[in-house]
């Protein structure tokens, strides 16, 4: 998968996996990672699916309607890529924190739904429930930040609450940060995620 890897200056910091939204690229979330943890290593990935020329991480049938067969395939594809990239770039696969926005947050959530121990933690900006009717792996206090919009036209508040409840039901330690700025990723939401990251995942 097309990607950028930048080695950080702090060996104890986790590797930040950056996953863009629809139409984005592996460059989009680099400034966000700098605000989260400038000392961390960064692995920023471009989705392998194209929707009318816009990169995505999996196909959809319509707005908000996922192609679940492709989602399962792309989830495994990304997990395989992470395993291989850890070997290539020399980072610890078990110390990866997902940072995703919209479509990127959805594929990150799908990894948590399908792959035991997928992430050390996750920052999900405006995610949806990736699939329903699954028994989730044990998440055993895995810290998860969800940035949600009370007036998000793509991801309803009810959807955010459902995802939070599913993750908590599997044992995750979830914090939901609410804003009223639609589906936009705002500076205040990023600041809240950075504060949460320092509390939950930053080692002294």
Image (cartoon, rainbow, N blue to C red):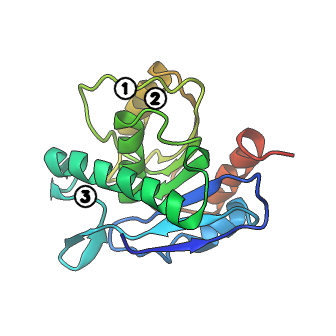
Q: Can residue 156 be seen here?
A: no
Query: Which of the pair 74/144 is nearer the observer?
Result: 74
> What crowding class fits label 3: few (fewer than 14 Cα within 10 Å), some (14-19), or many (20 or more)?
many
Closer to viewer: mark 2 or mark 1 = 1
Residue drawn where x is 39% and y is 64% of the image: 21
Residue 166: percent from left, percent from top: 40, 26
Residue picked out by circle 2: 167
Residue picked out by circle 1: 136
Q: Is residue 119 left or right of residue 84?
A: right
Residue 173: percent from left, percent from top: 59, 28
Q: Is residue 12 left or right of residue 101?
A: right
Q: Earlier in the sequence, mark 2 or mark 1?
A: 1
Is the residue under label 1 in contact with that under label 2 (CB below 8 Å)? yes
Counting the numbered discs, the total is 3
Placement of the N terminus among the 4 image quadrants: bottom left
Q: In the rendered view, would you say 59 is above or below 22?
A: above
Q: Earlier in the sequence, mark 3 or mark 2?
A: 3
Query: Which of the pair 87/112 is nearer the observer?
Result: 87
Q: Measure how far apart labels 3 and 2 are at the Cα level.
A: 21 Å
Q: Quadrant of residue 15?
A: bottom right
User: Which label belongs to residue 58?
Assistant: 3
Q: Earlier in the sequence, mark 1 or mark 3?
A: 3
SS class of the residue under badge 3? loop
Query: Which of the pair 133/86 is nearer the observer?
Result: 86
Is the residue under label 3 in contact with that under label 1 (CB below 8 Å)? no
């Amino acid at each position: 998968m097309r990607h950028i890897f930048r080695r950080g200056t702090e060996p104890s910091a986790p590797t930040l996996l950056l996953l863009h939204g629809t139409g984005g690229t592996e460059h989009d979330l680099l400034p966000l990672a700098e605000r989260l943890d400038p000392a961390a290593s960064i692995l920023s990935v471009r989705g392998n699916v194209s929707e009318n020329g816009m990169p995505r991480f999996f196909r959809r049938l319509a707005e908000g309607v996922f192609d679940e067969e492709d989602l399962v395939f792309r989830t495994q594809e990304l997990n395989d890529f992470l395993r291989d990239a850890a070997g290539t770039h020399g980072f610890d696969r078990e110390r990866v924190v997902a940072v995703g926005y919209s479509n990127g947050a959805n594929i990150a959530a799908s990894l948590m739904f399908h792959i035991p121990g997928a992430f050390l933690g996750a920052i999900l900006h405006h995610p949806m429930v990736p699939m329903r009717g699954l028994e989730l792996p044990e998440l055993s206090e895995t810290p998860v930040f969800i940035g949600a919009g009370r007036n998000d036209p793509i991801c309803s508040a009810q959807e955010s609450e459902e995802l939070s409840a599913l993750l908590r039901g599997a044992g995750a330690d979830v914090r939901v940060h609410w804003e009223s700025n639609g589906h936009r990723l705002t500076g205040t939401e990023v600041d809240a995620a950075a504060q949460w990251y320092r509390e939950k995942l930053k080692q002294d």
